[in-house]
Image (spheres, rainbow, N blue to C red):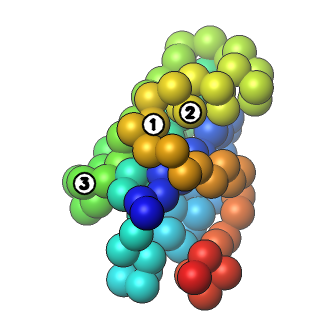
Amino acid sequence: MKLSIIIPFYNSSLTIQDSIESLQSPILKFIDEIIIYNDGSTDNYKEIIKDIKKRDSRIKFYSSSINRGGAFARNYAIKKSKKKLLMIIDADNIIDPKSLL
């Protein structure tokens, strides 16, 4: 079964790259999509996300110009998912690949 990872974030430019990169291990090939939702950030996340998207076609990025809160961000990203199996992580989580096996 394929897995969708949901990552809502707000002003997480210092941690979001490490979080996403922790999901890019070759043993995690069952991760079918990584849905990232920016909830009105005002930091320098744009270049970071742009660079990561170039390197990983599984990444789907959505953004809001205003902050609507964590619940809205998670629900929005969940609705964009095409999979039934979801995992929601925070933008500062580092996932040990073995923890998903």
Residue 91: percent from the left, percent from the top? 65, 52
Q: Residue at x 57, y 23 (%)?
A: 76
Q: Which residue is mark 2?
A: 78
Q: Amino acid at mark 1?
A: Ser
Front residue of 87 and 38: 87
**Under tag 3, what secondary structure?**
loop
Select label 2 or label 3 by which is in front: 2
Question: Residue 69: which quarter of the image?
Answer: top right
Label 2 to label 3: alpha-carbon separation: 18 Å
Residue that numbered label 3 is attached to: 57
Which quadrant holds the N terminus? Answer: bottom left
- The spot of residue 59 in percent (x, y) is 36, 49
Q: Are the residues at dot 1 and dot 2 in contact (C-beta closer than 8 Å)?
A: yes
The amino acid type found where label 3 is placed reads Ser
> Is 43 placed above or below 93 here?
above
Q: Looking at the picture, which amino acid does disc 2 mark?
A: Ile
Task: Please give the residue where the numbered disc 1 appears in the rendered image.
Answer: 81
Where disc 1 sits, the SS reads loop
SS of the residue under disc 2: helix
* 98 is higher (above) or lower (below) than 86: below
